[in-house]
Amino acid sequence: MNNFKALLKYKWFILVLTLLAAIFSFGFAYFKPAVYDTSISFSINRINKQQTTQYQYDDYYAIQASDLFSQTVMSWFMTPSVLLEIYDKAGIDPQIKSIASFTSRFKIKKYSPQNIVVSFKERDKNTAEKISESIISIISQKGEQSNKDAESKSLFEVKGAKPVIVESKPSLWLSTLIGLVGGFILSLIIVNFILYFKQDKVNQVTFK
């Protein structure tokens, strides 16, 4: 009860700090530029099927081969020279600050031996579209060149689907609510520290 009365003395401090945190969170979410989440799926398709005497295992071997080749495709998105080629074809400055940050721009996930999804973020929709087109073109071209048999026939094709580009922006109401709760909790912590040090000072004076 005493603690509650003590907190009431600082009610305006708590109210102001809570409102300031909510306003700051709202402003941050409102003025933050939109980000365009982009996703491209690639299918690894088998073409020019090789003849084998073990027909009963043909599908199994095809899946295993697709799985191995998909690993190669995934590795291209972690290769700086390939990424630079993608940006050059798109006519966009890659603005490379470090090799590590450059190669981490693209996230690659394999959902099956024949299905790969590449995702990345851009602040401009036009830039996201250009990079997407360049990715599909470069990866398809490299896929065709890197899996040829003795007769120079490609065994697999890497086919990119239509890119999915979605605008992403923080929710104003959710950000404001988080600011309210966070500001309220922070104000209580600060007030409790003030009360603690005041009580500690009183105890020291009483002890003396």
Image (cartoon, rainbow, N blue to C red):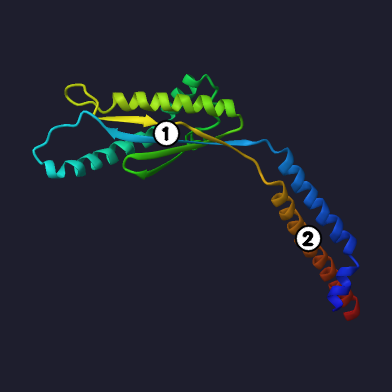
| Residue type, label 1 | Phe
Seen from the viewer's position, the closer of residues 65 and 192 is 65
Q: Is residue 21 left or right of residue 149?
A: right
**Quadrant that contains the C terminus:** bottom right
Q: Answer whether labels 1 and 2 touch (C-beta < 8 Å).
A: no
Residue 145 placement: quadrant: top left
**Position in image of residue 7 (x %, y %):** 86, 69
| Residue type, label 2 | Phe
Q: Is residue 79 left or right of residue 87?
A: left
- Which SS class for mark 1? loop
Residue occupying the point 38% across, 28% down: 139
**Quadrant that contains the N terminus:** bottom right
**Position in image of residue 62 (x %, y %):** 22, 39
Residue 203 placement: quadrant: bottom right
**Residue 184, labelled with which disc?**
2
Q: Is residue 171 above or below residue 188?
A: above
Of the two numbered discs 1 and 2 on the same chain, state the one appearing first in sequence: 1
Residue occupying the point 86% across, 55% down: 16
**Position in image of residue 73 (x %, y %):** 35, 34
Q: Is residue 113 above or below residue 73?
A: below
Neighbour tally class for label 1: few under 14, some 14-19, many 20 plus, Cα within 10 Å: many
Residue 148 placement: quadrant: top left
Seen from the viewer's position, the closer of residues 37 and 161 is 161
- Which SS class for mark 2? helix
Q: Is residue 162 above or below residue 12?
A: above
Seen from the viewer's position, the closer of residues 109 and 9 is 109
Neighbour tally class for label 2: few under 14, some 14-19, many 20 plus, Cα within 10 Å: many
Q: Is residue 154 left or right of residue 132?
A: left
**Position in image of residue 77 (x %, y %):** 42, 33
**Residue 87, labelled with which disc?**
none
For mark 1, what is the residue? Answer: 77
